[in-house]
Amino acid sequence: MSNRPGAPRSADTERSRASRNPLARLDRIPVWPYERKLLWILGAGYFFAFFDIVTIAFALPVIAQQFHVSKTVVAYSVTSSLIGYIIGAYANSTIADKWGRKLGLRISVGLFSVGTLVAAFSPNVTVLIIFRFVAGMGIGAEIAAVTTYIGELSPAPLRGRYTSWATTAAFAGLGAVPLVARALVPSFASGWRVLFIIGALGSLTILYMRRGLPPSPRWLASQGREAEASQVVAESEELARDMVGGELPKVEPVAAEPPAERFPTRALLRPPYVWRLLLFVGIWFFYYIGDYGWLTLAPTLFVDKGYSLAASTSYLIVSGLGFVVGSYATTHFSDRVERKYSIAVIAVVWAASLLVIGFFVSPAIIMVFGFIASATLGLAIPLMYTYTAEHFPTNARATGIALTDGLGHLGGALAPVFVLGALNLWGFAGAFDLMAATGIVAGLLILLGIRATGRSLETATAPT
């Protein structure tokens, strides 16, 4: 009898504590509680980061001719960029976890702007390889920084949707490259240089636009700066009330976040995070072999098959539309279906589309099934970015994303070796078989992850 009156009082106490917790208050907001221009600023940075990732794919055959080296030697610039990606992502994310997300977002854009601009003026392949490494540092830093930042700003029920919105802009960057490259690279000797310059100047503009970003309330809370976190959330609540035209839903309790670490990586070396770290390194490693095989080597593979560079680029303009279509589609279902199951199904479709291209290649097949393959990348990548972030605590989230996505890029760095090696050993179909197989392995590994869709980040990442 004496316990019954205590239960309601205990529940009331929990709700009272939750009402004072800025993160619990943030997670109950049912709309995007910031100005829309924030999404545009973040998305534009992603646009130019992804634009820069694939410019080398369309420039590679021409650079090989102009510098009088083999395509394999030029492909080392892809490898150097991805090694830079790993180092840049980890270094910048350690800074972001320790000194704030806004600093990390500025450093990332600065690095890939400068690296890409200098690479555009490369007098030889050695300089190209060095500054593609610098650009890669910035790209890796940008992807980890934006994924972390937008996930921490978003209320729990909207986390996947708005990460997907930013990634839609990223894939618009991928889709834009074939259009610009088709106009420049086959027609002008310096067309590939102009392609690089366009990406660099665009990203420098974004660096200027990022001056007024709000701080992450989750990062502030992890640093013990509760009053500042509460102020950021209070401003978000005020805007949200105006948008919904009334009061917001009741605040529900969320799990407590662990305090900040002096060295963020330490938090990831303890169970259960160390096992999550290893799992996602494996997932991204296998996924990126096929991903970067398609993104950076497709023009080279089609040229080797006998298609001209101009024709191959034209086919990839059509297939590249799939990037935008796929990523836009995730904004409508990413928070409705458990993410790991969606990703696994998408991986199977990705593999099937590559197998069809490998065995039945023709212009129509490249455009239709290339569109499907590109659409699956557009579908999977935003879901995988969101899902990766959901496995790590705020005090090491940026570092966790950087290490898993960054070390996973070893697969992307080795993609030219694996894919071109398969091309030499087994021919055109063998190269596509290899890319398809790595996608299947990644899809199976993703099923070992936690359930996180729709849950607060604090609850999802808490040790079980």
Image (cartoon, rainbow, N blue to C red):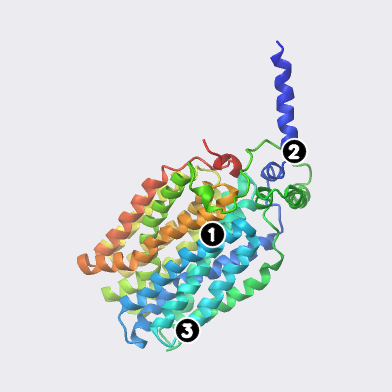
Which amino acid type corresponds to the residue marked 2 in the rendered image? Ser
Residue at which label 2 appears: 19
Residue at which label 3 appears: 193
| View extreme (left): residue | 425
Of callouts 2 and 3, the N-terminal one:
2
Q: Is residue 142 left or right of residue 277?
A: right
Of callouts 1 and 3, the N-terminal one:
1
For image coordinates 57% across by 47% down, the residue present is: 393
**Which is nearer the eye, 81 or 456?**
81
Q: Nearer the viewer, mark 1 or mark 3?
A: 1
Which amino acid type corresponds to the residue marked 3 in the rendered image? Arg
| View extreme (front): residue | 262
Which quarter of the figure is the N terminus placed in?
top right
**Alpha carbon distance from label 2 to label 3:** 55 Å
Residue at which label 1 appears: 144
Residue 370 in percent (x, y) is at 38, 64
**Which is nearer the eye, 296 or 272?**
272
SS at mark 2? helix
**Alpha carbon distance from label 1 to label 3:** 27 Å
Report the number of numbered marks.
Answer: 3
Residue 8 in percent (x, y) is at 72, 22
For image coordinates 56% across by 63% down, the residue present is: 92
Residue 61 in percent (x, y) is at 35, 80
Which amino acid type corresponds to the residue marked 1 in the rendered image? Ala
